Image (cartoon, grey):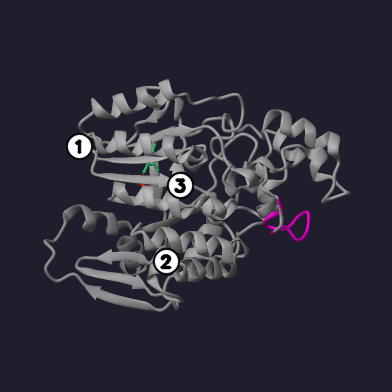
Amino acid sequence: MELWQEFLASAIRTPAQLRRYFPEIDVAALERVAEVYPMCVTPYYLGLVQRIDDPIARQCIPDPVELDSFGLVADPLAEESMSPVPCVVHRYPDRALFLVSSQCAMYCRFCTRKRKVGTDWAITDELRREGLAYIARTPEIRDVVVSGGDPLMLSDGLIEGVLSGLRRIPHVEVIRLGTRTPCTLPQRITPRLVRMLRKYHPLYVNTHFEHPRELTPDAVRALTRLADAGIPLGNQSVLLRGVNDDPAVFLELNRRLLSARVKPYYMFQADLVDGTAHFCTPIETGLDVIRGLRGHTSGMAVPHFVIDSPGGGGKIPILPQEYVRREGRQLILRNYRGQIHLYSDRTAEPNPCEEIAGMPDLIEAFEPLAAIG
Ligand SMILES: *Cc1c(COP(=O)(O)O)cnc(C)c1O
């Protein structure tokens, strides 16, 4: 067994085992949760917990409130109905999501796929072959996001089978791996794994850090190995109440990620998934985080704030209103200090639609004058 497999074998998978670390927990209540939404935490990740309700604990320790659905649904992004074969979600014209593993090193309590990840959902060789076959016969797919579960829960040999299978498909240009192991099980990023991955460029890795305390020396070492293999790294975080719903926390997280050569890529509004309602934040929180980053720190540290639209409409970016309005060719803009700046869009064709869109405002502005006149 490799070291990471030993770490995984010693993961905490029952509330009774958690009791050793947190004598105050209600084992029976947490067992009812774990029957529906399995738990798994690596000893490494649990070691980052300082208090039972801190930002690390909230991500990994089951909470009885998960059993209250608050009217939310299991699959708000309609992934199942956009799956031409069981392991592929094909929502966008030129890219597809390929689920190759049903397991993770840790079951995040806010998981978008908590309806099935870690349950008796299983992804077999046969299903992976079916996924590859679908991608092979669908020439418009040029970018494949390999995810799960966590693809790095597979053995190096199985991962290589997936990557080499994808590389044999001429129309697949880019491969992206989505994995949280640099955060939850950094020991998984072995020199051997990285030597294998680098054969399949252009390969990107998107990882999943939610809080600055997760960027430990072990995590940074794992990220360094990947970056040194020429793998561009991105991060996808989720805005989570009680974890990172604070501009100062995100500022530190994203600065530390950049220092570890990881570009913050997406910041997701938490999906409206059954069992995760307690993590949801108002949209204004996300806008405040973006306002707290843009202009105040490197532009490289500013992710796209997106809502993955319920019903399967895809990711939609939300921006603070920096483009206040347009009056003819004059744009009225607001900078990061809240000051108004003008930009003259000199070379633009006057656009009748935009002129009309600005009309109600103008009418409102001129109405008092008209009354006087
Ligand atoms: C997020 C996602 C992708 C990738 O989207 P990008 O915006 O290109 O990162 C592809 N397919 C599905 C189903 C997704 O949810």
Q: Quadrant of residue 326?
A: bottom left
Q: What whole-number distance in Å separates the C-alpha atoms at marks 1 and 3?
A: 29 Å
Residue 53: in magenta span:
yes
Location of the N terminus by quadrant is top right
Task: Give x and y (percent) for residue 34.
Answer: 72, 33
* Amino acid at pointer 2: Arg
Q: Is residue 221 left or right of residue 55?
A: left
Q: Earlier in the sequence, mark 2 or mark 3?
A: 2
The picture quadrant for ligand 1 comes to top left
Q: Name the mark on residue 307.
A: 3
Q: Earlier in the sequence, mark 1 or mark 3?
A: 1
Residue 278, above or below 287: above
Mark 3, ligand 1, within 8 Å: the answer is: no
Which is nearer the eye, 240 or 57?
Answer: 57
- Find the magenta span and give its range: 48-57
Q: Name the mark on residue 261.
A: 2
Task: Give x and y (percent) for residue 230.
Answer: 33, 60
Q: Is residue 347 visible?
A: yes
Mark 3: secondary structure: strand
Residue 198: in magenta span:
no
Task: Give x and y (percent) for residue 350.
Answer: 14, 61
Which is nearer the eye, 327 or 219?
Answer: 219
Q: What whole-number distance in Å separates the C-alpha atoms at marks 2 and 3?
A: 25 Å
Q: Is residue 304 visible?
A: no
Q: Are marks 1 and 3 in contact (CB under 8 Å)?
A: no
Circle 1 residue: 171
* Amino acid at pointer 3: Ile
Residue drawn at 55 percent across, 70 percent down: 252
* Amino acid at pointer 1: His
Q: Nearer the viewer, mark 2 or mark 3?
A: 2
Q: Is residue 83 left or right of residue 352?
A: right
Mark 2: secondary structure: loop
